[in-house]
Amino acid sequence: MAFLDGLLPAYYESIIITVGIYIILALGLNLITGVTGQLSLGHAAYMCIGAYTSAIVSMKLGLPFIVALLCAGIVAAIFGIFIGFPVLRLTGDYLAICTLGFGEILKSILFNMPYVGGAMGMAGIPPKTTLLNTIIIALIVIIVMVRMERSRFGRSLVAIREDEIAAECMGINAFRYKLQMFAIGTFTAGLGGALWAHKIMVLQPRDFGFMKSIEILNMVVLGGLGSIPGTILGATLLTAIPEILRFSSEYRMVIYGALLVIMMIFRPHGLMGNTDFNKLAKRTFRVFNTNNNKDKKSGMEG
Amino acid sequence: MLNIENIDVNYGAIRALVQVSLEVNEGEIVALIGANGAGKSTTLRSISGLVKPQSGKIIFEGKEIHNFPPHKVVEIGISQVPEGRRVFPLMTVLENLELGAFSRKDRAGIKEDINNIFLRFPRLEERKQQPAGTLSGGEQQMLAIGRALMSRPKLLLMDEPSMGLAPMLVQEIFNIVKEINQTGTTILLVEQNARMALSIANRAYVLETGSLAMSGSAKELAENEEVQKAYLGH
């Protein structure tokens, strides 16, 4: 299992793991906000639930990492359903405010829970997140998301985003589908949180505030709402850019912010808005084909 | 086939429908006419489950359906061409039609029905890979009708199919409505264009500020003096 360990310098390995975790988190939010169009400003809250759950399971109960991962996803999804049940009846701004509120409430509860260390947080979580298991989980999440996008379920979600009333008139049970979708999205957030906890090894409630939710949302928006390859690209860039900009020390976040603004002016639909893996493959294939044809032509001329 | 018995619908303090009753028999085209805000669309929305009547009954083929959610109403054979068309703008024409068949599982039948719709609306076939949002108003209306037919409804509810269309297209749409009816689909048609609606309907109801003002055969109503004055502009 450990053959990837030590293959890369620790610094790069750490960045790649972080990218992987953010890809997982961003794909969950992409399902909720990008594909189904339900603006959630509380994605970090489900990440937080996953992180704390997994920490409790592996530290306090001493169970293996895989169990901690699954528990993290399941508990996050249960909270997702619990919150989604009243909240998903709302739309647009109202939904956004409710999800935001839940994130803040969760933070205050954790601050005042001695069992998980309150404001001091939990320390001493075993470092179980490796390059290999992050990559495997990220791949599984990507594959599941791509398959789901092409399924009947995925198409219903897009229909709900485009016009919820029309979708209901087609016979789609919009509320049930939204709830299922929310459970899957929050499950993914829980997984991401668990990986995060076992990488950072210290959890503090303030790490999972509003800004974390916005950071994940940024990745989805930058990549292109609803586009899986876009979300992956967004998560990668927004994790890598602050690292690349490290040389500029205190101006780092200024440049980062400016890049985001410029980006939104020139590509308002995100880097890969409306692009799925199908289109991406087709486009690559077309480029490849035309190149081939050119070769043939030039060959004939020669 | 469809019986509405004394339904009341309130939006908060506003009474949208007061004791409305109407009946649609199998094979008919029934028109529901009236001015803006008379409650025509609300009547359709309460049949399709988008609003719940506070009292009264809606019975379809012997079943009480006024508590059904919209997706269940589709399953029992009622489908709707919603007001303002409401096609899925970013999806292609073909995807829109496929979603119309959401409640069905028979792939062969769905394919056959898509072909039939393309036969009826050749323009849609030419544009089947185009996003629905890029179609013209008339084409979108055709798509909305085609999409509603994809669930093989026994009863088709149409909400203002002529809205915002050029006069020539209005005639075309009404011809299509008539054709659909001749192939065996019962139609309940809500229209502001009373003249057109009465010209193709068998029977009609006139709604005024939330309650029924008149009803009768389309011919009778078209000749009625009050109707002529209020809705036909004589």
Image: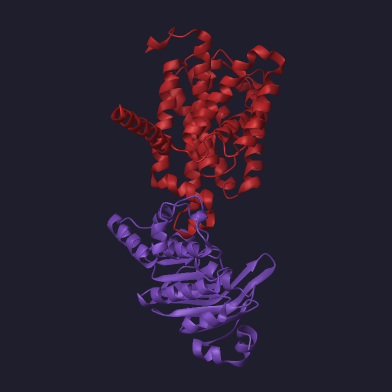
Chain colours: A red, B purple
Nearest the camera: B178 or B13? B178
Q: Is residue A45 visible?
A: no
* x then y, percent, for residue A277: 42, 35
Q: How many marks?
A: 0
In this rendering, is residue B173 above or below A21? below
Q: Name the quarter where the N terminus of chain B is drawn.
A: bottom left
In this rendering, is residue A270 above or below B27? above
Q: Name the quarter where the C terminus of chain B is drawn.
A: bottom right
Judged from this view, the residue extending furthest toward the front is A302
* x then y, percent, for residue B231: 62, 83
* x then y, percent, for residue B162: 54, 71
Nearest the camera: B172 or A292? A292
Q: Is residue A184 visible?
A: yes
* x then y, percent, for residue A92: 62, 47
Q: Quadrant of residue B46?
A: bottom right
Q: Which residue is rendered at x = 53% and y = 48% of the image? A: A161
In this rendering, is residue A98 above or below B164? above
Nearest the camera: A187 or A39? A39
Q: Is residue B121 left or right of residue B223?
A: left
